[in-house]
Image (tube, rainbow, N blue to C red):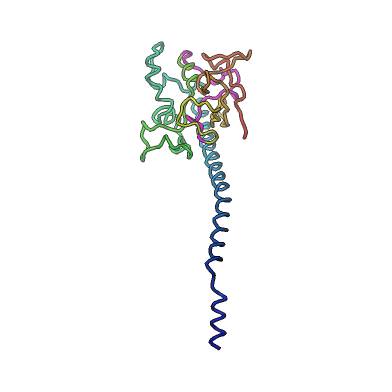
């Protein structure tokens, strides 16, 4: 009777080889699943970033409606007409929370930080000097300075003119922290009609891409001075 019980106990136990095989199988499954889980997590963060800018876009449109169709400009933050030094001095209003971001009165300050952004972090509570993940595009800022009272209706093709976008490509080529990358960036953006979508940067200066300084006129020629006759070629991008 005792011999039979001992045989049963021995049959129920794992051998060292069996245990190693099970561990190996688990390791293989984990190696197969982790990249898929990481990709799904990155995609979720990209969706959250797009949703952020959808909220900001709605706030931007409300601001424009409340200000006689005028878009936020350097003069809103203290720039002096004709003084280009004051324009540069107030450029921080394009990316700091205390600038354009706070002026849009979005209920949740976290809407201005992309969950994939590892470089721009917000304080608790949020400080006006915090760098957000998004920035007002410089070609718009510059043109609103050159043409005081620049209105949304002045855009030649509002749905094709990127106006407010991610500071860096946080989701695709991950070009941060280089401001002007050699890999083509795809930036989540708000366009002139305040809808949010992906913006595939096409313009290059030398061997680097510049998302801030260009628009195309109705004749297709490059125009860096005034977005009221411009739009971006191949801006809306779906991947």
Describe residue 203's horizontal placement relative to residue 89 as left or right.
right
Image spot of residue 190 (x, y percent):
54, 29
- Quadrant where the N terminus sits is bottom right
Determine whether, in the image, residue 160 is placed left or right of residue 106.
right
* Residue 43 falls in image quadrant: top right
Q: Nearer the viewer, residue 72 or 10?
A: 10
Q: Is residue 190 magenta?
A: no
Q: Residue furthest bottom?
A: 1
Q: Is residue 218 above or below residue 159?
A: above
Residue at the image position 57 percent from the left and 76 percent from the top:
11
Q: Nearer the viewer, residue 214 or 101?
A: 214
x and y percent of residue 103 in the render? Answer: 43, 29
Counting from the top left corner in percent of width and height, residue 166 is at 49, 30
Position of the C terminus by quadrant: top right
Identify the residue at the far top of this view: 82
User: How many labels, in total?
Assistant: 0
Give the magenta range: 146-170
Give yes or no for residue 149 being in the magenta stretch.
yes
Quadrant of residue 160 within the rendered picture: top right
Q: Position of residue 132 (x, y in %)?
A: 43, 32
> Residue 159 vs residue 63: left or right?
right
Q: Report the residue at 49% width, 27% height from top.
A: 63
Q: Hey, which residue is sitting farthest front in the picture?
A: 17
């Amino acid at each position: 009777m005792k011999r039979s019980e001992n045989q049963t106990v021995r049959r129920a136990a794992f051998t060292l080889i069996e245990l190693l095989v099970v561990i190996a199988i688990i390791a293989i499954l984990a190696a197969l699943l982790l990249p898929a889980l990481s990709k799904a997590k990155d995609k979720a963060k990209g969706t959250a970033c797009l949703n952020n800018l959808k909220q900001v876009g709605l706030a931007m449109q409300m601001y424009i409606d409340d200000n006689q169709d005028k878009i936020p400009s350097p003069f809103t933050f203290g720039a002096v007409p004709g003084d280009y030094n004051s324009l540069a001095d107030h450029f921080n209003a394009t990316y700091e929370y205390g600038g354009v971001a706070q002026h849009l009165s979005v209920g949740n300050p976290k809407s201005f930080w992309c969950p994939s952004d590892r470089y721009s972090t917000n304080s608790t509570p949020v400080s006006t000097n915090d760098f957000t993940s998004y920035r007002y595009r410089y070609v718009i800022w510059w043109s609103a300075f050159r043409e005081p009272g620049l209105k949304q209706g002045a855009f030649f093709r509002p749905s094709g003119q990127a106006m407010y976008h991610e500071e860096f490509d946080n989701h695709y080529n991950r070009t941060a922290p280089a401001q002007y990358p050699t890999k083509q960036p795809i930036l989540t953006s708000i366009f002139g009609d305040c809808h949010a979508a992906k913006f595939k940067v096409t313009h290059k200066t030398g061997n680097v891409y510049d998302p801030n300084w260009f628009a195309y006129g109705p004749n297709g020629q490059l125009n860096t001075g005034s977005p009221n006759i411009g739009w971006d070629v191949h801006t809306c991008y779906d991947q």
